[in-house]
Amino acid sequence: MSAGDRRETFGQQGSPGTEGFALLTVVWAISLVSLCATIYMSAARTRSVEASAAALHARANAAARAGMMLGIADLVAAYRNPAVLNDDAGIGSGQCQIGGADVVRWMATSESGRVDLNTANEELLDALLRATAAPEDDWVAASSAIRRSREAMNALSDDGKAPAFRSSADLARLPELSHAQFERLRPFVTVHSGRAGLHPGKASPDLLTRLVDRAGRGASSSFFVADVPGHVYRLVSEAVVGAAVAQQRAIVEINPDGPVTFAIREWRDGVEPAERAFPNRSAPDCRALQAR
């Protein structure tokens, strides 16, 4: 074979290094495409799960809102029956089913069973602060701070009755009160009863026990007994739709004799620890309750 023939044959075979590089390039490109496809599929699955969860939460929130309306309807109906109002076995409470599986439940408790931060007499206020204070808490300083806030607002108003606290959460802004003590106080206080005392029949057993133990007085003592239950209620609605749980809370004032039978003073969303357990009752279909 001549030298020219050998050169022609060598040129036709190509370079082994070039072929290896081309193979690596193809493998790298395939791997990159596979990685991109995997990332896209994972993102698509994540978006699908998020969309499904968002849809469940939206349904749960809508169901909780419907539960609030059913609870308000129960309260308005109860005011036509005084015997029901005097029974503290869960006025305005109930539950129903959506589609046979998802549950909506609601419960109303009277605000007159709580200590009003704006109007409670000083003896009751001190008893409550002592009853909820931990050893490290200075309940005397906290009581003085609440009194000063009330006196300052009363001095600024024409009638001397301006509320120092617009909501129970305002209590947390007092530097004399620790966050831990505020959390212990919150289930027992309100700004909506407008009374110097509380109604024993509407107060929680936990609150009554604390007050009696700390004050050393009977449950009928005049220092904390209010005259009438009042017309303001704390309404809690909870809906469980699949794995989603939604809660809505409102302060509702009932006025059955007025042109508007109820007014909502406060409204907030969000799951919080329950102050009382929901009653265990049968759960009819919600559509049957809405049609009544």
Image: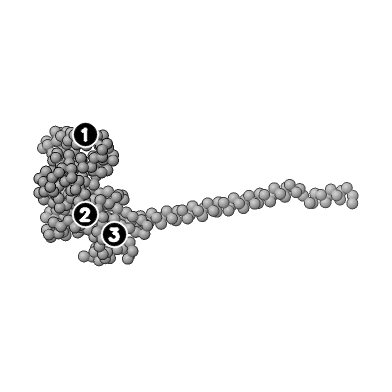
Q: For residue 159, which quarter of the picture? A: top left
Query: Callout 1, which amino acid?
Result: Ala
Residue 199 place in picture, x, y as percent: 14, 49
Query: Where is 121 relative to 238, above or below?
Result: above
Specify the label residue 61 is tagged with.
Answer: none
Q: Identify the residue position indicated by label 1 in the image.
A: 141
Q: How many angstroms separate mark 1 from mark 3 (CA)? A: 43 Å
Quick check: 202 left or right of 134? Answer: left
**Colour scheme of the rendered structure:** one colour
Specify the label residue 108 is tagged with.
Answer: 2
Query: Callout 2, which amino acid?
Result: Ala
List the single residue furthest toward the right: 2
Quick check: 126 left or right of 183? Answer: left
Q: Identify the residue position indicated by label 3 in the image.
A: 104
Residue 265 place in picture, x, y as percent: 20, 48
**Residue 170 visible at all:** no
Q: Nearer the viewer's eye, disc 1 or disc 3?
A: 1
Query: Callout 3, which amino acid?
Result: Val
Dot 1 or dot 3: first in sequence order is: 3
Residue 60 place in picture, x, y as percent: 33, 56
Q: How many angstroms separate mark 1 from mark 2 (CA)? A: 33 Å
Q: Residue at x 86, y 50 (%)?
A: 5
Query: Where is 25 relative to 241, above or below?
Result: above
Other-residue count near label 3 (Cα within 10 Å), few / some / many at <14 / 14–19 / ≥20: many
